Amino acid sequence: MAREQRKLAAIVAADVVGYSRLMGRDESGTLVRLRKNRTEHLEPVLAKYGGRLVKLTGDGALVEFASAVDALSAAIEFQQAMAEANADEPADTALVFRMGLHLGDLIVDGDDLYGDGVNVAARLEGEAPAGGIVISRTVHEAVIGRVKATFDDLGGLALKNIERPVQSFRVNWTPSDWQPPITAEVSAALPNALQSPLPLPDKPSIAVLPFQNMSGDPEQEYFADGMVEDIITALSRTKALFVIARNSTFSYKGKSPDIRQVGRELGVRYVLEGSVRKAGTRVRITGQLIDAQSGAHLWADRFDGALEDIFELQDQVASRVVGEIAPALEEAEISRAARKVGNLEAYDYYLRGLAALPGYRRENLNEAQSLLAKAVEVDPKLAIAWATDAFRCVAIKSMARDSSPAQNAAEAENASRTALRLDRNDARVFAFCGHSLAFVCRRYEEGAALLEQAVQLDPNLAVAWIWRGTSRNRFGQPDEAIADLERAMRLSPRDAFMFLAHGQMAAAHLIAGRYEDAVRWAESSVRLLPHHVTAHRVLVASLALAGRAEAARRAWMTYRQLDPQTRLSTLPERLAIPNEAALAKFAEGLRIAGMPE
């Protein structure tokens, strides 16, 4: 079979410390114990985390994983299992492994792997202590905050036959956080155990089934599987969802299971299924989101593209699918919470509070405040409810409804600080709190840093990109803001907060001096939310600076009704823009339109 380049994959290399010494003392006994440990400890963790054993090299092993998180989790569980197995073993006969992990490009040759990903993993293995794990920077970036472990920075290591220094980290973990892997005996009994319905998690839960290859071309199988793996990885980045791991969902590969049965067996409320069809140089991917309890279809769409760069297409489709189904899941959860009566749980109060916000009317904001207060009363540690309440303060200020700005700022600060103290691993918390601290509390630099962390934690969170774009407008960087806002609109075109993205696109073009473009985007934002104060403000200033005096005057009359107390002297407080040139642009246009001093 010809060699082919494969997309990034996580590689684990492992070997036995002092293998030659052990073989010299007791060759047959060492081999028996080595095989026993592979059967009882290595194979179960590979099955659990979807690892593929590429090859065995005497005392060592090379394993491929689709996910860096799965790779490191498997490595830690294996090392923990070996530590427990060696507890009663004399030190001079114990089989102790060291492991190296790297995330890199591979060359596939039949069932074997070569290339940078393999070479670096193998060299890092040699740097690991006995019973320990060393990972590269690429693995560290992929797993930080997503695995129960800490990391010691080893700096740039000079590895044999590797031209560049490789920044590396030693992995530390608490044994109580990592249970021994499932044994072969227990693993064999799993299918029967799964016949009993699993309880649903306390947040939206989803399983992504293997996509059907409708092309009749076995070579497209890897593309369909890679698509699903990318979608699972992308969905897993958001803490709002409980996502079933790949190795569980791929047990349905080649089957046509009943979706309700899948929901019972995997303990999920939603299932995503789809297909891939290739025709000539084009490929079509379809997907549909199903309620596993009722069997109802919640969302369906198709995506077409060229096969010129199949991996880029795979990434694009995965990103679009996630951007489409995330709002559909949220809508379904909000509808489910709205149907409940009586004693609601904290998460359902939060969902209903979130659903009230996009209306941006006084009654909506009051309802959101009441519901979110109930959420944190039931569960004071529900960080996302606190963060959403911080965003409520943003809505109050942006709609000119803060009769007491100091009190609104104090509430925003308290809600943000509480949320960040409770959870610093949720991209939504970073996004909501970052925007609130910057806009309401004028902590511009801190807010920008939190928004940067939000998009790093979850690159598919559309609202994080909207507010990072807003932050860049705030610092007078309109072109960078437009790039962020365009990404948000690609990710979630049906997002309930899309009027915010359009309004900030208008602001970016205004700051850049493209006034007609600013008018077009501001009008679009107003169409999405007719009483959007920010968009009306941008519309007035853009029309005036574009020389459309009469239209600017009419727009000013409408805007003044929404924000009757507005004055040029209050503009710095209203806009919260530290960049003087951007603030001056707004002031110039609004003065021309008739705003009083």
Image (cartoon, grey):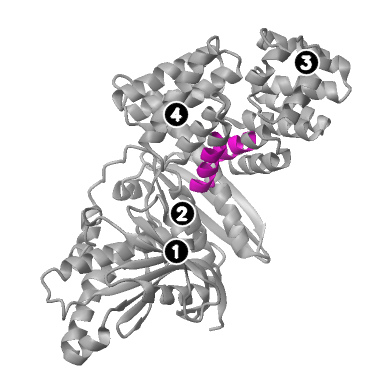
Q: Secondary structure at mark 1?
A: loop
The image position of residue 300, as x and y in percent, is 54, 44
Residue identified by numbered label 3 = 555
Numbered badge on residue 233 = 2
Q: CA distance from mark 2 to mark 4?
A: 28 Å
**Measuring 52% from the left and 56% from the top, which residue is drawn there?**
275
Q: CA distance from mark 2 to mark 1?
A: 9 Å
Residue identified by numbered label 1 = 66
Which contiguous range is marked in magenta? 447-470
Q: Amino acid at mark 1?
A: Ala
Residue identified by numbered label 4 = 416
Instruction: Based on the picture, tell me whether residue 283 belongs to the magenta stretch.
Output: no
What is the quadrant of residue 241 in the picture? top left
Q: Is residue 119 above or below residue 535?
A: below
* Front residue of 309 and 291: 309
Q: CA distance from mark 3 to mark 2?
A: 46 Å
Q: Secondary structure at mark 3?
A: helix
* Front residue of 445 and 477: 445
